[in-house]
Image: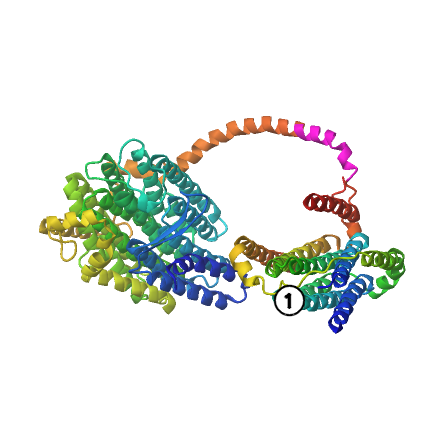
Amino acid sequence: MNDAIVEIAMLVTFVLMALWAVLATKLLRAVVALAATSVLVTLLLFRLDSPLAAVFELSVCAGLVSAIFLGAITLTQPENEAEVAVSAKERIRRYWYLPPLLLLLGVALLQVALPDVPTTAAAADDVRKVLWTSRHLDLLGQITVLVAGAFGVIVLFKEARKNER
Amino acid sequence: MSGELITLYVTAIVLVAVTGLYYLLVTTSLIRAVIGLELVTKSITLGLILAGRLTGKVGLGQALAITLIVVEVVVLVVAVGLILLAHRHTNKVDTRDLRSIKG
Amino acid sequence: MTPTLHILLAICLAPALALVLLLIPSRARSLREALAVVAATANLGLVATTFGQQSRIELPWLGTSFDLSLRVYHTASFVTTAAAGFGLLVTLYSLPFMRKHSAHGAHYALMLLSLGMANGAVFSNNLLLLLFFWEGLLGTTYGMIAIGHAGAFKTATKALIISGITDLCLMLGIALVWAQAHTLTMTNLRLPLEGMAPAAFVLLMIGAISKGGSMPFHSWIPDAAVDAPTPFMAFLPASIEKLLGIYLLSRLALDLFELTPQSWLSTLMMVVGSVTILLAVLMALIQKDYKRLLSFHAVSQVGYMILGIGTAVPIGIVGGLFHMINHAMYKSCLFLTGGAVERQAGSTDLASLGGIGRKMPITFACFIVAAASISGVPPFNGFFSKELVYDGALERGTIFYLVAVAGSFLTAASFLKLGHAAFLGPRDKKNDGVREAPGAMLFPMLVIAGFCIFFGVNNAFPIDQLIVPMLPEHLIAEARSAGTHFSGWPSNPTLVAMTAAALLGALINHGFGVKLYGSGLHAADHIHDSPGLRWVYDRAERRWFDPYELFMRGSAYFAQAANKIDRANDWLVVGLGRLAQFASRGVRAAHTGNTSAYIVWSLIAATFIVIYLGQ
């Protein structure tokens, strides 16, 4: 029972953090909220016996992604204080639908009764085995995508430097 | 896992996905749009692992989740690169300023 | 390490590190250089340790006959080790030479990529796989010429077009082989020369000798010598491309086809070889630029290898293959001396050089060793391989032998001219401040020069340990039963006497020329001005004999015709565009330019996909 409470608390925080990321007026806070959402996903993944994916999620999504966002924000300087104040009113007009919508949807979904599932899964198959034996092409694709991304970043930032001069 | 817990998980996943999509639709800031996309991806990651757990294929679920994370980061990086490019052209990061493909 | 991993690493490691190298910012030049040296060393280690191994690696792909099939055996180990050795030495040489070059990173990355491609081409046991790596090497060649300077693109394009066309021939040849034998696995191929097989042989041969730089596919090399960075010349055209081209030629002549001395194809190869020797060396003789002169020799010497292998008799083949490795050594050494002169004296124009031998003694010494090797002076390595080729050529026909000796005479004459004009004679005032090249450039030259001497004096080691095992069993047996000795002092004293006479003649000729014109640079002008040759030279200098230039002139007419077609096409396309505009009026309204609208469209589409997959 105790376990279930922990899990419920985490799920609720997960949704609240996502909501905060959306409703935050300052972009910087939204990024922090996103990182927090990521951390909660990590914890939930641990609960679901998926440590490898959890570690990936934590290091890549909570760490790298936040860093990239911070870089983008400093480079573009999207909002200054005055603009935030002006847009705050407009934001309320646009976002006030969201919390009630979520509430309604949540209540509706919680009515759905699902059958129990036996927990035999744990050691059924090893992620490393799956990754290395049946998903060669995925790995190749991932490497290619990563290299493409790295080169894309280099090219983009190079252009940025050139334009600054 | 008990049925109630699964319902809770599914609810949370759907709610976060809806939040992200709503944000994606409503916001006018390109950076915020990417945050919305990230939220959707987070919920899907969790959904994949949950599905793997429920069908007894934890390894496959994890493999797919890792693939998703990698793709997510690259998409993000390229998206941020495009935002920077757009910023250089219009000096703003607002979707309302990007209308050049209007027919 | 398992053989599979070992060989895959040998192919993939250098290119992978090349990609890493490109990620290093241009500020960290030293880091790039360190990585390049490490990668080249690792590459050398990986291929050198395959010596003595025999294994096959089959990675199934695209059905039965297009397997990714790799094979480790003596020949492949030897060729890749030689290539990797040159790769490492040229990398070391590039450290000071390319330091200030704008395309610093691209140079090292392309070099490492070339090494990987060369390893792949030699280890591949499937013709299609070989073609893949062959084309990859073409790409790196293009890149390495193009980074020379702003105008080098033209030369790079020339190289790309010439090699591209010959690679097309290679592709057609492979298709013909497939039609004949229904397999592309090289170890399973042994085609008798009948039916379509001779055509396949000729097409494959064009691909091989063009990579080697033989006439008439040579004309980009002299241009590249002027435009591309000098390490490139020492690296690709002088050593790696020669090794690969002659490797493929030897595989064609020894394994893939049943080539006999009676075949007309053997005679064809010998004719191509002889013509290349003579014409290219005649062109080399009149050049007034250090590197351009060397590049024509790079063409001419290929003729000896093609002639040797074309004889199809054991002694000629051994000579051709030995000449391949010897040539790679002395020619890259010569290019390296050329690069050292270029860097220290600021020019490779022979008219502005002269007398710098005393200022750059080590470079000059290396030059002398390499030049003596290429001219066939005993006891350097070039002498022994040329004698073997002569022996084989004489067995097939006196005319081929005479052409080869004439080539030797002219080679010696042109190197006497080059050495005299560049290093000896009066020194220009502006060259007074010239100093010896830095150690990182001298070291590779000294190593290679040392090998030139070692392979000459102790020729039993390379010939018996490295070259002869490359021959198929039946040829070794044939040679053994005939009592032929490949190594040691040449067995035919008449041939040695002829060679000595040719070299002496070159020396006398040079003295005569110097007396006539008063300078080393013009010592060969009396050959240039001799009645019959003058006409040919005039035309050659106007590039009448360059197939590429002829092709380009022809293509001007073609372009005019194409222009007309293009106009008609244009009219059609514009018409179609108008039609499409008219038809798309309805869709236009959907393009609001509003991001939210596009997201809604995407969501609707995603919903449909989910519904479809859910069914």
Task: Please tell me whether residue A106 belongs to the stretch shown in magenta.
Answer: no
Q: Locate the C terminus of chain C and report the quarter of the image it occupies.
A: top right
Residue at image location 23% in from the left, 38% down from the top: C266
Residue at image location 48% in from the left, 29% down from the top: C558
Task: Please tell me whether residue C583 belongs to the stretch shown in magenta.
Answer: yes
Dot 1 amino acid type: Asp
Which residue of the protein is positioned furthest toward the bottom in this rendering?
Answer: A2
User: How many dots with numbers?
Assistant: 1
User: Hey, which quadrant is residue A33 in on the image?
Assistant: bottom right
Residue at mark 1: chain: A
Q: What element carries label 1?
A: loop
Q: Locate the N terminus of chain C and report the quarter of the image it occupies.
A: bottom left
Position of residue A113 in the picture relative to residue C233 (left or right):
right
Position of residue C607 in the picture relative to residue A132 (left or right):
right
Q: State the image coordinates of residue A97 (x, y, percent, origin top left).
A: 87, 56
Label 1 sits on residue: A49
Q: Is residue C227 or residue A10 the one in the foreground?
A: A10
Q: State the image coordinates of residue C244 (x, y, percent, origin top left).
A: 34, 50
Q: Is residue C200 visible?
A: yes
Position of residue C384 in the picture relative to residue C58 (left or right):
left
User: Hey, which quadrant is residue C488 in on the image?
Assistant: bottom left
Q: Give the range drawn in magenta.
A: C576-590
Which residue of the protein is positioned furthest toward the left in this rendering?
Answer: C493
Q: State the image coordinates of residue C57 (x, y, percent, origin top left).
A: 38, 53
Q: Magenta: predominant secondary structure element?
A: helix
Q: Is residue C245 or residue C105 the one in the foreground?
A: C245
Q: State the image coordinates of residue B51 (x, y, percent, origin top left).
A: 67, 57
